[in-house]
Image (tube, rainbow, N blue to C red):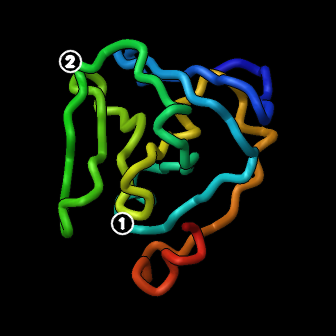
Amino acid sequence: MTETPLSPQAWATGGCHCGTVRFKVWIESLEVIECNCSMCLKKGFINIISKPEHFELTQGEENLATYQFNTMVAEHRFCKTCGIHTHTRPRSHPDAYDVNARCLDASMTTLNITPFDGQNWEANVKSIQ
């Protein structure tokens, strides 16, 4: 990670710990979500929801694995080498990508992080759609 802060309306790059998986994402807004569901909490995932045309996997597709559980809708993608979860196809936004802000190369200091009660996902999901 660098000291360069993220800016809205700009592309940002990121990747896994070992560097095998790399991506770029359009940072539309500095508003992001910190979910406390069982998965996000354990991974430390900070959610940047991105339209499909605003996310590009630039390297490492062959090294990604997918984890699914419960409803089997969300696809949690992670590097098979280092285990870092870089992005997800989320249940809340099935046609979008959910990028882990902690995997970005830039500093997260400019992000406005809003908590989301994912432990009560069904009751609260409408607030983030």
Instruction: Classify mark 2: helix, strand or loop.
Output: helix
Q: Marks 2/1: CA distance?
A: 27 Å
Pointer 2 with pointer 1, Cβ within 8 A: no
The kind of residue on which mark 1 rests is Ser
Task: Estimate the x, y position of residue 2 in percent, counting from the top left.
Answer: 70, 18
Q: Quadrant of the N terminus?
A: top right
Task: State the image quarter where residue 114 is shown.
Answer: bottom right
Task: Estimate the x, y position of residue 42 in percent, counting from the top left.
Answer: 39, 56
Task: Estimate the x, y position of residue 121 in percent, counting from the top left.
Answer: 42, 77
Identify which residue, 33 or 95, lies in the foreground.
95
Q: Nearer the viewer, mark 2 or mark 1?
A: 2
Q: Is residue 69 left or right of residue 18?
A: left
Q: Residue at x 72, y 52 (%)?
A: 31
Residue carrying label 2: 62
Q: Residues within 10 Å of mark 2 (few under 14, many from 20)?
A: few
Task: Estimate the x, y position of residue 125 in percent, counting from the top left.
Answer: 49, 75
Instruction: Classify mark 1: helix, strand or loop.
Output: helix
